Amino acid sequence: MSFPWTPDKWSVRMAQWRRNLISKFLMRWYAGVMPEMSDTEAEAIEAGTVWWDAQIMSGRPDWAYLRALETGKLTQAEQAFIDGPLQELCALLDDWQIESELHDLPRPVWDMMIREGLLAMIIPTEYGGKGFSALAHSEVVRTIATRSITAAVTVMVPNSLGPGELLMLYGTDEQKAHYLPRLASGEDIPCFALTGIEAGSDAGAMTDVGVVVEREIDGERVLGIEITCDKRYITLAPVATIAGLAFRLRDPEGLLGGEEELGITVALVPTDTPGLDTGRRHIPSGLAFQNGPVRGENVFVPMDHVLGGRDHIGKGWRMLTGALAAGRGISLPSMSCAAAALSALSCGAYARVREQFGLSIGNFEGVREPLARIAASAYLIDAARKLTAAGIDAGEKPAVVSAIMKCHATERLRQAVNDAMDIHGGKLVMEGPRNYLATAYNSLPVAITVEGANILTRSLIIFGQGAIRCHPYLLDEMEAVRNPDREEGLKAFDHAVFAHIWHDIRNFTRSFVHGLTFGRFAHAPEGAGALAPYYRQLTHASVRLAVISEMALGVLGGALKRKEALSGRLGDILSEIYLLSAVLKRFEAEGRQAADKPLLDYCFEDGLYRVQQRLREVIRHFPGLHWRILLSLFLCPLGQHRQPVSDAVMNAAAQCMLEPGGARDRLTRGVYIGEGDDPLAVLERAFAAIIRRDELLKKLKGAKTELDEAVSKGVLSSSELNEIRGTEALIREALLTDDFDAQAVAAASGADRRA
Ligand SMILES: Cc1cc2nc3c(=O)[nH]c(=O)nc-3n(C[C@H](O)[C@H](O)[C@H](O)COP(=O)(O)OP(=O)(O)OC[C@H]3O[C@@H](n4cnc5c(N)ncnc54)[C@H](O)[C@@H]3O)c2cc1C
């Protein structure tokens, strides 16, 4: 005879009670507050993977993982390509000629880009592409963008949405075998057409339709689709030979034997298909890259043109978000890094070369402030670019991280280029071949808008998706609530919700304790040494984010989606922690260079202050006084103590740009500098001359000698004297701007209007 209350039976009984007495009620409450999701949103949530973002949202990031992650490693073939053909291509790029004279890339540039496989970097070698890693792809785009934005955009599109990426992810074997070699060889130039007049950010509003029909072709009945569309803003459309076209598919006659409304579908349509109209051009922010509408009326394509085949009918949106999950972490962030590095390089040199009131303008703190901001932004976004590429190369498709990168890299780009314009004054207001930043400046609205407009990405996507996707238990709970098998659902819910409760108890306690000690005892990885305080501050920020996210989800539930201002601020905290963790990774990976320390410090002081500001704003706008009090108690029981970047750190960061050395070299590596009268080469020569002149003048000062007597007194050699005297001419050349014949200007602007 066995005793009825054995430990096993007891625990089974306890689990039943817990399920029936607690979890059942929690589940009912949960179903009420759970955010409602449209199909489009649900598909976006499911796209891609979660990665380092999930670690950050957990409240206790695994620093050992981050430190062990390999970043910045190129294969020999990739490095050889960057050192060889890429430099040759850059030498061919003349930005002024492209933007203001040809309004297109010159033929030899197109030919070289196609010949060298630049439009097929992501296509595997077995199809004739370059099969580059995400890092190599990113390095190439970054270098080209320092020379020509139009060339960079032209390279970016086929290597992003494509449709090369879509074909590789979802194409049928026949489609891959047919199109990928043609895309790799340049026989086909692709474009991807999603956006229409009604459908911008909201693809669900699309009115372009495809109707399933049968047509008689050469005496045979062929099942296919008649597409009617009016797409706009499509990059490469005017020169494309193949378009990935998204539309709503309908089957009114039931020819496929299913429902009438089949959803968003993508087809591959050769642009010479009768009825399809391409070739007209938009002029995007005055830039020369090819962009235009794609219009079509009853354009017939056989059924096998559906990307991915019949199985993928209606899955167009899911496919697009899946492809974007990685792509948008590379393309625009690489372009942003290029322009930020170019701004840092040119502003550092110009602030030294340009003298006003008898001093280089780099001596004035008013100028040093934006200069430091540019330098720190360039350091930070390049660090994040490399970290993101490493994640993608490790097999991740990090949807939330890609959204963070797209939005925040382009926002920092906007700030950096605007700062650079301020520092240069009239020198960069005047357009012409001598203006090395005009195109980057003109491209700002493009970078902000494409691949997910920034306002939407910040306020809806980053936290909206991050909070659900990166949460260790939330998706399991949501799935359990939706489970039609109620008993199974309850079991799964009970399991997830109690793990969730323990997770919260730990995080709330840690947040409170770290709040009392200002994060001084938060977790730092072994071996962090002098960097331990930086890790601790990020761990503290991460646990605060976990707590405030939990509160936002628990209190607001589905209503959080409509509270975009709150969601945007929470997304900023997540983004800031991601960017700062990338900065730490970079600093460590580059060997903890002492010269870069001011940049690290600037990023941390600025980033942690931003986190604090956003936390403060979230608490202030959180609905309900009692919740606000509770949040303050758990997040900052002794108040918030961070200050904006100190003047000492700001001055030190600016100084990194004002003199040659490791910090400047590392920050501006990969910026293409031409030869001869290339404006950047002219500026760099003047910069080098000024540095040398200042060294020689120090000698003079030390010897208390006048310049005219320096040679006779043996303080300077005659060649050194000539160097000093030659500096003036080099400075003058670097300061020059362009002017044009008045009639030529009138003629050119008339030609622009007719174009
Ligand atoms: C130069 C250029 C190249 C492009 N290339 C391509 C291409 O190759 N293929 C292609 O298919 N498309 C392309 N696009 C289209 C691009 O993807 C869209 O412009 C983008 O999706 C935004 O759509 P929209 O311009 O209609 O803006 P709208 O959707 O009208 O948005 C206007 C503003 O409202 C904001 N907004 C919208 N909804 C919300 C919301 N719920 N919450 C908060 N804010 C919101 C947006 O962030 C934006 O700031 C290109 C666009 C440009 C400018």
Image (cartoon, rainbow, N blue to C red):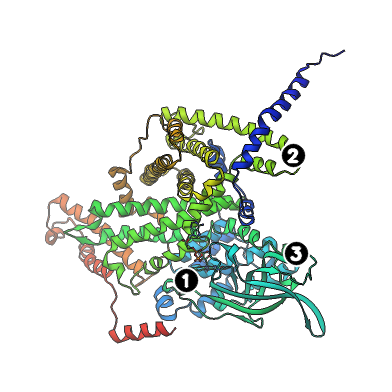
Q: Which residue is mark 2?
A: 486
Task: Where is residue 198? Give x, y as percent.
Answer: 55, 68
**Is residue 733 something that shows in the picture?**
yes
Amino acid type for the residue under numbered disc 1: Thr
Label 3 and label 1: CA atoms lie apart by 44 Å
Quarter of the view holding residue 422 = bottom left
Q: Which residue is mark 1?
A: 150
Amino acid type for the residue under numbered disc 3: Glu
Of mark 3 and mark 1, the one earlier in the sequence is 1
Q: Is residue 719 above or below residue 479?
A: below
Task: Where is residue 501? Give x, y as percent.
Answer: 60, 31
Q: Which residue is mark 3?
A: 259
Q: Is residue 242 above or below residue 615?
A: below
Quarter of the image that includes the C terminus: bottom left
Label 2 and label 1: CA atoms lie apart by 56 Å
Which secondary structure, mark 1? helix
Amino acid type for the residue under numbered disc 2: Arg
Q: Residues within 10 Å of mark 2 (few under 14, many from 20)?
A: few
Marks 3 & 2, CB-CB < 8 Å contact? no
Q: Residues within 10 Å of mark 1 (few under 14, many from 20)?
A: many
Task: Where is residue 363? Give x, y as percent.
Answer: 23, 53
Q: Nearer the viewer, residue 41 or 269?
A: 41
